[in-house]
Image: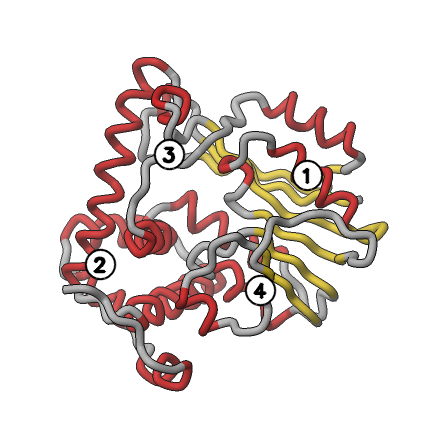
Amino acid sequence: MVPVPVSSAIDFIVIAGMRIRNIISNYRILDLQRNNLIKSFDEYDRKIYEQIENHVDQYIEFYNLTDSQVYDHHLSFLKIFLRHQELFNKDKKYPYERDGIITKIPRIQYDISLLLSCLLTKHRFEIMKNLSLFMKKNMGKVAIIGTGPGLEISLTKDLCKSIVAYDIEISDFVKIKFPRIFKKELFRFSKDTKYDYIFAIELLEHLHEPTELLRHIYQSLEVGGVTSLTTAKNIPQFDHLYNFDNEDIFERDLDQIGFKIKEKKIIKHNYLRKDNDVNNIFYILKK
């Protein structure tokens, strides 16, 4: 069955429910992962978790996905990732380093797995939680670099005076859910546009030269402006091009660009081989 998007933004808003809870409950391995994650939640955690659930529900309903399609998309993505992880354990090379190509997978499959991982794994939930904790009302002029399935926009848009999202590929779901905020282009410094806040969450590892983008971000911030970003270490995902395996070198580069580290949080992964020292780092940097 080929998913068919709903016909309008009105339908899209009306039919969004809480399906993902039921879907996860119907698959024992997913249910165990969720229960393990949420067992220590406080009230704030539950609030963020419910926001993510709502966004995932809307995505599923927009594409008319069945329960089994959601599960199969997630499982297919995990099989690819775990195969690459096994190879990385042997030669410490990312798939792109080894093969010189980026594997193409269906966009919906990729999005579903990314969204579900926020509901099932501690590290991805922690990234979204830290993003939410960073937000405040009337944040001013905001840019988000990289839209993916739109979750970061969901968590930020209502607190911004204005928001612009940059990406070279934007899904139908994101375009309809968040109309009129996109620039379908690479993020580049323009002397005519300055931002108070810039977000680059789970993006830098997808670039050959992340420091080039960081320079554009620095130049694009107002004096005193802030950027929030993440790095990824020893995560051999098929489309990761850069491994942040030395945070000292990365932080030296940040200093040379002009950034000051305002906050740094190491988010360890607890489901992969521990000897790989797998983590994300959530940074808040000030110009």
Q: Which label belongs to residue 187?
A: none
Question: Mark 1 vs mark 3: which is more N-terminal?
Answer: 3
Which residue is labeled 2 in the image? Answer: 70
**2 or 4: mark nearer the eye:** 4
Q: Which residue is mark 3?
A: 102
Q: Is residue 247 toward the left or the right of residue 124 in the image? A: right
SS assignment at label 1: helix
Task: Give the alpha-carbon distance from disc 4 to disc 3, as whole Å.
Answer: 25 Å
Q: Is residue 96 above or below residue 49?
A: above
Q: Find residue 193 and report its image quarter.
A: bottom right
Rounded to the nearest angstrom, the CA distance separating label 2 from label 4 is 27 Å
Q: Residue at point 82% right, 58% down?
A: 192
**151 or 264, nearer to the observer:** 151
Circle 1 residue = 214
Check the picture and name the quadrant holding the N terminus: bottom left
Q: Residue at the location (40% across, 86% down)?
A: 10
Residue 101 seen by the camera: yes
- What residue appears at the point 40 percent right and 68 percent down from the top-left corner? 173
Q: Amino acid at mark 3?
A: Ile
Nearer the observer: mark 2 or 3; the answer is 3
Quarter residue 265 falls in: top right
* Residue type at tag 1: Leu
Of labels 4 and 3, earlier in sequence is 3
Of residue 36 and residue 186, the one placed in the foreground of this image is 186
Judged from the image, the secondary structure of the residue bearing numbered disc 3 is loop
> Which residue is labeled 4 in the image?
182
Mark 4 → mark 1, Cα distance in angstroms = 20 Å
Residue that appears at 73% across and 64% down: 141
Which sits earlier in the primary sequence, circle 2 or circle 4?
Answer: 2
How many labels were placed on the picture?
4
187 displayed left or right of 245: right
